[in-house]
Structures are given as C-alpha cells and as structure tokens.
C-alpha cells in the first residue's frame, strides 16, 4: 500500500458520516457471563414484583411517582432484557438503556436496602452500564474522563509537575497563616498518604491548603504522593473496570512504595467507595481488602477533634445540617462518625429526614456531575427531594463531605433558592481552630527584616569573594 | 375419578414432594457451587452475625425501614406467610394423613380456627390481587406469569376451603385441591417462589455486602 493511501485513510474515516457500529454480541455475552454468578441468578429470578423499592428511589419520588422510574422496572428493562435476550441486543436498545442506567439512576443503592430480598438493584444497573460501556455507549462526559484516566492516570489530566507545583504553592500560601506549614511530597513512612480529587489541584487548590493546615496543626505525620494521588474513580461509574483499576493500582502501589500506614481520602464519597471497597477487586487484592488501610477524612477529623489535637476558638454557632453522601454513609458505614464530628464542631445541628444510611442521594452521584450539561436539567429535577429535605431543616449552613454532593447542592441552592452556605468539614475546622503559639506565622515585617539581613549578608559575602578573586588574579 | 384420586394422593404426592425437595436442594447446591467461582465478594466477607441480622430484620414485620413505610402491606405479608406455611402443616386433615402414612404427625390446629385462617390466607391473596391492580409501580412489573403464580399459590387454600365446607362438588374440589397443591410444589423450586429458601441466601449475601464489607446496616 502506498504511503499516500495510508495517510488518507484516517481523513476518510473522519469525513464519513457516523455509521452505527455493529454491536459486539460476543463481548456483551462475556460481560453477562462473568457477572452471572449465584447472586445475579438469584436476584434475576426471585424478585417478587412487590414494588417496595419504588418508594426508596428519589427519581421516582421527584417525578410524581412515575412507575417507570421504580428501581425494579429500570433493572428489568435494562439488565433484565440483556439476560433475557442472551446479549443479542441492538444499538437502539443500548442507546435507550443509556438513558435508563445513567440518566435515571445514581447507583446510590438505596433500593438495594429497601428490597425485602436484598436484591442489589444498583449492582445490576452497574452491570448494565458495563455492557453499554463495552459498546462505546455511555455519556460523553464519562467517556472523556475515562479516557483521561487511561492516558494520564487521573480524570482531569493533571500532570505530575502541575500537581507538585500546586502543593508547593499552597504550602507557601497557607504557610502565611500557619508557621512551618509544608506539604511533604513522597515522604517515607508517613502515617497518612493523602489522596484527593483532581478538581482540588485544578479548581479548588484551597481545599488542599486547608487540609494541610489541619494536618499540620494536628501535628500529623503525613504526605502527598507525587503519583497515585487521585483517589476518585469515574471509570467506576462509566462501567469500565479495566480503566477503573488504573488509578486504584497507582494509589496502592505508591502507598506501599512509600511505606504509608494509611491511605487518607479527601472529603469525597465515591473515591472512598473505589479505594476501600471496589478497588481491591479490580486490582485482584487478596481477600477483597485494600493492601493498605483506607481512611476517610471524616474519620481522621473525628479522631483529631475528639483527641483534642486541634482546639476550637468556639463552636460553630449558626444552625447546621449535614449531607450524608451515599458512599460515605449507606455504602461506607460512617454516618455515626460524621455525626460525632458535627457535634464536636457545631452547636446547633439539625439533621435531615430521612438521614444516616436512609439518606436520599443528592442527585449528583453515580457520575451525574461529570455527565454535564445534557443531564443538568434532570439533575435539578431529581434533586427536588434533597432540596426539600435541606429546606425543612431550617439550617443556614450545610456540611457536605463529598465533592459531587457539593457541586450538586450548590446547584440546588441556586435552583431552589435555598439560601444555605455549602461547606466542607475542612472549612469549618480551619475557620474555628486555634493556631498553637509555636505555629504562629512569622510577622510580615519580621520577615522583611529577616530577608534584608539575609540580603546584606549575601552582599557582603559576594564582595569578599570578589575581593579574594581579585587578589588571586592580581597575584 | 377414583383412579385419579388414587394416583394424586399416592404416587402423585410422592413425586410432588420429591421434586419440591430435590429441586430446591439441587438449586441451592448448584448456586453455592457457582458462587465459589463467580461470587468472590460473598465469600470474602462472610460474617454470621450480619447475615442473621439481615435475615431477622426482614422476617419480623416493621423491623426494617422499608416495611415501616408501608405498614399495612407489611402486616398482610407477614400474616399471609405465617398462615400459608402454618395452616397446611398443622391442619388436622393433613395430620391424619401423615399419621396414616408415617405413623407420626404434627400437632393440629382446632378445625374452626384452621378454617378461619384459611380465609385469612385467601383474604390476603385478594389484597395482593387488588394491590397489584391498583398500584401503578406494582402493576408495571406484573406479567402473566406473576398472576399465574399468585393464583396458583392461593388455589390450594380456595379449593381446600370449599372441599372442607362441602361447597360445590366435594370430590372434584378435593381432587383439584390435591392436584393444584402438587403443581404448586413442583413449580416452587423453578420459579420466583423459590424464595422460600433463596430468601435466606439473598439476605445473607446483602448482609455480607453491606454489613461485613462496609459496616452498614441494610434494613
């Protein structure tokens, strides 16, 4: 074949109208077979069609109890059909299913909890996602982030240099408030290896700075890794286990390499789920447990506050409520830890109803936030349930220990005019904590003076060196 | 008619019992074997405490948030299941047959009470039928097979009650009663009615998944 023909080929494909790709039935059958274990078979066959799951779903509740939004129905028309047709499904079916499994479910798993048989409906939806994903049928936002992870190891393509620079920058910035503050990179044998959501270095570096303040004031032996610092995992929500394993493996490997005692997860829900519960299976860790213990920020913050490692000037006074991120509460078992922490920090706590493991998803989970504009309207509509919950508490501040919930509740705040301040635990702690005397920042004047003294000394040294050089030359 | 009765109450009954018992045993053994291969998370996080809690909170009415949200349905479900299992086992007429066949029997309910409890089962069944028709989220899930199974599960009680009270042609009712009961027993292991045993396995699985693996309650 001539070189010219070779060069032309990609152009031709680019120009051709997008022909629908054939469905790779073999691949679908492979995924269905891999998941066709005892649990899946039981779930698929014993659903009594009782309908109890419907009332558990916020999509169903937010849209006037539309029966088509009941979890059992969504599982039946997606994964149920796939098994029934033995994987022989059409592209139109997959396109339609995309709307169900991503557009009508956040994988919050509330229905799994409300089913009398304990049928894990959300896991069935996740399997349907994997099938769609395998055929390239998935929301564009998730396809993009999955691709980013595949290429760069993190979902927002942050380079190692940018990450480390951001850490240095924040250390400098926040060092002006807390003396001696640093963000140690790749420190060996730290108690905690802190991992974050890429949106922190990208858009909210102050999150990083605040975390550093807390860790420093609490005199923690901690570090950030230069690689494997992204604990989020949107490939998990995209239904792509192969790519989902990449950031998890990076993180585990780095923690082992650094001899870190714990992997600490930022205030993020799905990162915790990925790192602690799902990740071990993607990388084949023995026993289904992470090789290094995984700790969520709220657990560490609770310990720090309970043990008095950080003292507060006073407790937070305004009425506060708390969002239970699904992947921290229902799927993480930390609802009581969060409440202990709130009690240690705040005077006037007003819980939502329902709360704890019974919380409603905010509507931003399961990949909804990165799915972006095409799903925004729906996100706002389904978020009605959460908005009403928040309003009913009468709180003026809401603590949200999850990035996706944070974005969603910020949007709901505007959409439903809730008038609440949306904050992370970090913000409350750093706002109210006492900086110990030995960590009081060096005054600016002193700093200038010190700098001047240093400059003078340098000048003198230089002069002397010149003199010496001259003498040498002269001789 | 007599021959049919003889067959149904003799070999027919044996076939039904054997298919029922063996069917369930084979299904459970097969699923457990399969789980060794494909359900690693299940075996990685076994914990009898969480399994028992997961089962208990869904056996007892109102012990789960979900059933508390629909208290009437929860109560009817509970009463239905207790009577559906209890009445046939502790029915005097059945125990007389046990006595005859095996030389042993279970204690029997007073006849009048058993009669009332049979009506309770039928009443619960009517409730399920109405609920299935009236509630949109249940109707949308319901197919012909669900209707068939629901009616089949009720049919031995209806025919048994009619036969006992000698309403309609007694012998026909009795034969229908035995026949439908046997069909029901045979179908149980191969349908969603297998939840008579699989309930305990699926609840165990979700108890491990949420409780042992994540430290979270699931009721």
Image (cartoon, rainbow, N blue to C red):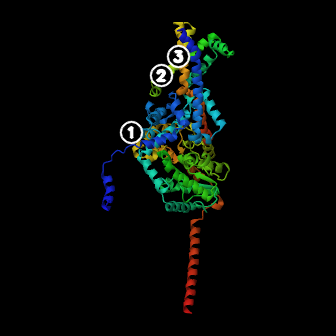
Q: Are marks 2 and 1 on the same chain?
A: no
N-term-proximal mark, 3 vs 2: 2
- The residue wearing badge 3 is B155
Measure the alpha-carbon separation of dots 1 and 3.
Answer: 41 Å
Indicate which label's residue lies in the foreground, 2 or 1: 1
Residues B63 and B42: in front is B42
Q: Quadrant of residue A227?
A: bottom right
Name the element at disc 2.
helix
The residue sitting at 55% across, 11% down in the picture is B5
Name the element at disc 1.
loop
Looking at the rendered structure, which numbered label has been put on residue A349?
none
- The residue wearing badge 2 is B147
Q: Do labels 3 and 2 share a chain?
A: yes
Kindly tell me whether residue B122 is visible in this rendering. no
The residue sitting at 64% across, 36% down in the picture is B50
- In screen coordinates, is A408 left or right of B41? left
Chain at tag 2: B
Q: Are marks 1 and 3 in contact (CB under 8 Å)?
A: no
């Amino acid at each position: 074949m001539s070189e010219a023909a070779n060069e032309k080929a990609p152009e031709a494909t680019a120009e051709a109208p997008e022909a629908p790709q054939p469905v790779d039935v073999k691949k679908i059958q492979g995924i269905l077979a891999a998941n066709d274990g005892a649990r899946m078979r039981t779930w698929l066959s014993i659903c009594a069609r009782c309908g109890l799951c419907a009332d558990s779903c916020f999509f169903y509740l937010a849209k006037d109890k539309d029966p088509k939004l009941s979890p059992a129905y969504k599982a039946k028309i997606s994964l149920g059909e796939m098994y029934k047709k033995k994987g022989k499904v059409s592209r139109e079916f997959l396109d339609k299913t995309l709307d169900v499994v991503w557009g009508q479910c956040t994988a919050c798993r509330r229905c799994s909890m409300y089913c009398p048989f304990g049928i894990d409906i959300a896991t069935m939806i996740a399997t349907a996602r994997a099938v769609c994903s395998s055929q390239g049928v998935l929301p564009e936002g998730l396809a993009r982030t999955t691709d980013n992870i595949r290429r760069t190891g993190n979902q927002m393509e942050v380079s190692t240099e940018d990450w480390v620079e951001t850490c240095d920058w924040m250390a400098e910035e926040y060092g002006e408030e807390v003396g001696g503050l640093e963000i140690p990179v790749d420190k060996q044998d730290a108690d905690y290896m802190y991992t974050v959501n890429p949106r922190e270095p990208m858009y909210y570096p102050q999150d990083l700075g605040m975390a550093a303040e807390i860790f420093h004031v609490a005199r923690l032996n901690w570090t950030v890794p230069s690689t494997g610092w992204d604990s989020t995992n949107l490939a998990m929500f995209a239904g792509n286990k192969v790519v989902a394993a990449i950031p998890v493996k990076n993180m585990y490997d780095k923690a082992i390499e650094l001899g870190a005692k714990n992997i600490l997860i930022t205030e993020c829900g799905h990162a915790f789920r990925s790192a602690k519960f799902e990740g071990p299976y993607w990388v084949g860790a023995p026993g289904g447990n992470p090789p290094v213990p995984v700790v969520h920020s709220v657990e560490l913050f609770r310990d720090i506050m309970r043990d008095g490692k950080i003292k507060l000037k006073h407790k937070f006074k305004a009425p506060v409520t708390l969002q239970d991120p699904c992947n921290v509460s229902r799927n993480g078992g930390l609802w009581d830890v969060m409440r202990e922490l709130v009690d240690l920090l705040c005077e006037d706590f007003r819980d939502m109803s329902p709360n704890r493991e019974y919380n409603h998803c905010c509507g931003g989970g399961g990949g909804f936030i990165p799915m972006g504009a095409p799903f925004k309207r729906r996100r706002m509509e389904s978020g009605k349930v959460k908005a009403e919950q928040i309003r009913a508490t009468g709180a003026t501040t809401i603590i949200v220990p999850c990035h996706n919930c944070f974005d969603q509740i910020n949007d709901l705040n505007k959409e439903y005019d809730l008038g609440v301040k949306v904050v992370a635990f970090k913000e409350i702690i750093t706002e109210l904590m006492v900086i110990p005397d030995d960590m009081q920042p060096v005054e600016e004047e002193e700093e200038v003076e010190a700098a001047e003294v240093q400059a003078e000394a340098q000048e003198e040294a230089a002069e002397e060196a010149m003199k010496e050089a001259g003498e040498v030359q002269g001789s | 008619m007599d021959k049919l009765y003889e067959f149904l109450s003799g070999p027919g009954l044996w076939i039904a019992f054997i298919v029922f018992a063996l069917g369930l045993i084979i299904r459970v053994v097969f699923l457990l074997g399969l789980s060794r291969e494909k359900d690693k998370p299940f075996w990685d996080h076994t914990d009898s405490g969480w399994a028992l809690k997961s089962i208990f909170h869904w056996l007892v009415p109102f012990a789960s948030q979900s059933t508390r949200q629909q208290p009437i349905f929860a109560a009817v479900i509970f009463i239905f299941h207790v009577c559906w299992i209890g009445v046939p086992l502790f029915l005097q007429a059945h125990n007389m047959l046990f006595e005859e066949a095996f030389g042993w029997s279970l204690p029997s309910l007073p006849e009048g009470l058993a009669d009332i409890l049979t009506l309770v089962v039928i009443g619960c069944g009517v409730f399920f039928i109405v609920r299935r028709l009236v509630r949109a989220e249940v109707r949308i899930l319901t197919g012909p097979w669900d209707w068939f199974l629901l009616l089949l599960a009720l049919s031995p009680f209806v025919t048994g009650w009619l036969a006992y009270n000698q309403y309609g042609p007694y012998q026909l009712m009795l034969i229908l009663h035995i026949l439908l009961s046997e069909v029901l027993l045979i179908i149980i292991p191969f349908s969603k009615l297998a939840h008579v045993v699989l309930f305990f396995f699926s609840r165990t699985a979700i108890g491990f998944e949420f409780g042992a693996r994540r430290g979270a309650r699931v009721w």
